Image (cartoon, rainbow, N blue to C red):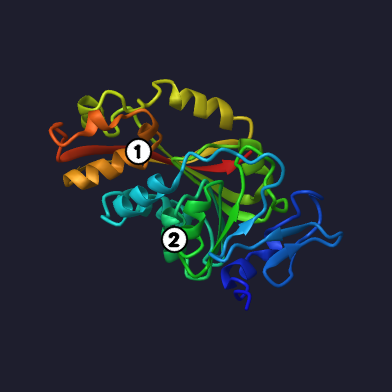
């Protein structure tokens, strides 16, 4: 017997557009989504919709990274980051908002926003099927769709009240297209001080580009202007397994060898968390 149609996906079905036809709406057809001319997209048994077509994007989140991220986020070490993103969203929109999380990962940050907005619905986009399995279960009002941030989104124009981007790649033109004129883009990114103690102990970790803020401003300026920026800085106490998961859940996992993290390696038990969170309005 086929799995029932995911209720959260049904909530957001009107947002979706056929990625092949571009303009045509999708409708539920048993365990699939279908457009009026017959393009069909499977719904995985885990509850997410697979809309990627053609050459598949390469995801940075493999199974090991997703497992590490799930374990680390469950410690609450990044709860203040989740809280600031949720608060910036809640301050800007109504309770019945539509929230699109681009590069949603496991859905941790999207679920935080939906917890603050009791009538809101959420839609997460990501390329990692491993992460989407969790994102589809992250919240009862959060749907999940396999998609590549660098392609035009399979979403209708002007349908999102919030676009959320936390530690994720950005597509400013598409952010602007899918946002309502009164909507907000919320971007959370690390500062140069983020996890500095850990990078001191594990030099192979990927560093934060000193020009990151300038590049962000140049990319967003044609489409958005900043409304408010908040800095979140604190020290997190972590066990050794937590630290190993923190390294393993990031792109640094591809650069750090097992020798860098062997049992004899000294790792910090406290790390500094430092991020900027900005709410933008459309130009």
Q: Is residue 189 left or right of residue 176?
A: left
* Mark 2 in CB contact with mark 1 (< 8 angstroms): no
Q: Residue 232, percent across and down?
A: 31, 42
Q: Is residue 56 left or right of residue 157?
A: left
Residue sitting at the far right:
37
Q: Residue 165, percent across and down?
A: 50, 44
Q: Residue 23, percent across and down?
A: 81, 52
Front residue of this view, candidates 122 and 183: 122
Which residue is identified by label 1?
275
Can you see residue 127?
yes
Upstream in sequence: badge 2 or badge 1: 2
Q: Which mark is residue 111?
A: 2
Q: Is residue 109 left or right of residue 58?
A: left
Q: Is residue 65 left or right of residue 142?
A: left
Residue in the image at 64% along x and 70% along y: 10
Can you see residue 237?
no
In three-dimensional space, the C-alpha distance between marks 2 and 1, rounded to whole angstroms, equals 19 Å
């Amino acid at each position: 017997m086929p799995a029932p149609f995911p209720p959260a996906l049904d909530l957001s079905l009107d947002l979706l557009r056929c990625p092949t036809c571009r303009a045509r709406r999708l409708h539920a057809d048993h365990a699939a989504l279908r457009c009026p001319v017959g393009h069909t997209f499977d719904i995985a048994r885990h509850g997410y919709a697979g809309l990627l077509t053609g050459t598949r994007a390469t995801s940075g989140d493999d199974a090991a990274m997703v497992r590490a991220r799930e374990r680390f986020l469950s410690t609450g070490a990044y709860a203040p980051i989740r809280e600031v993103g949720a608060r910036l969203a809640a301050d800007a929109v109504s309770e019945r908002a539509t929230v699109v999380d681009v590069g949603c990962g496991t859905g941790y940050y999207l679920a935080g926003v939906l917890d603050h907005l009791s009538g809101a619905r959420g839609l997460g986009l990501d390329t990692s099927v491993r992460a989407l399995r969790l994102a589809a279960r992250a919240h009862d009002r959060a749907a999940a769709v396999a998609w590549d941030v660098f392609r035009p989104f399979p979403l209708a124009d002007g349908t999102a009240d919030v676009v959320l981007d936390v530690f994720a790649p950005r597509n400013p033109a598409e952010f602007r297209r899918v946002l309502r004129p009164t909507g907000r883009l919320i971007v959370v990114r690390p500062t140069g001080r983020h996890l500095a103690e850990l990078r001191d102990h594990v030099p192979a970790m990927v560093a934060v580009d000193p020009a990151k803020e300038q590049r962000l401003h140049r990319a967003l300026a044609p489409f958005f202007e900043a409304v408010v920026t908040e800095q979140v800085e604190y020290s997190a106490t972590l066990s050794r397994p937590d630290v190993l998961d923190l390294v393993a859940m990031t792109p640094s996992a591809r650069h750090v060898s097992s020798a860098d993290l062997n049992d004899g390696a000294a790792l910090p038990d406290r790390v500094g968390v430092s991020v900027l969170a900005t709410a933008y309005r459309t130009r």
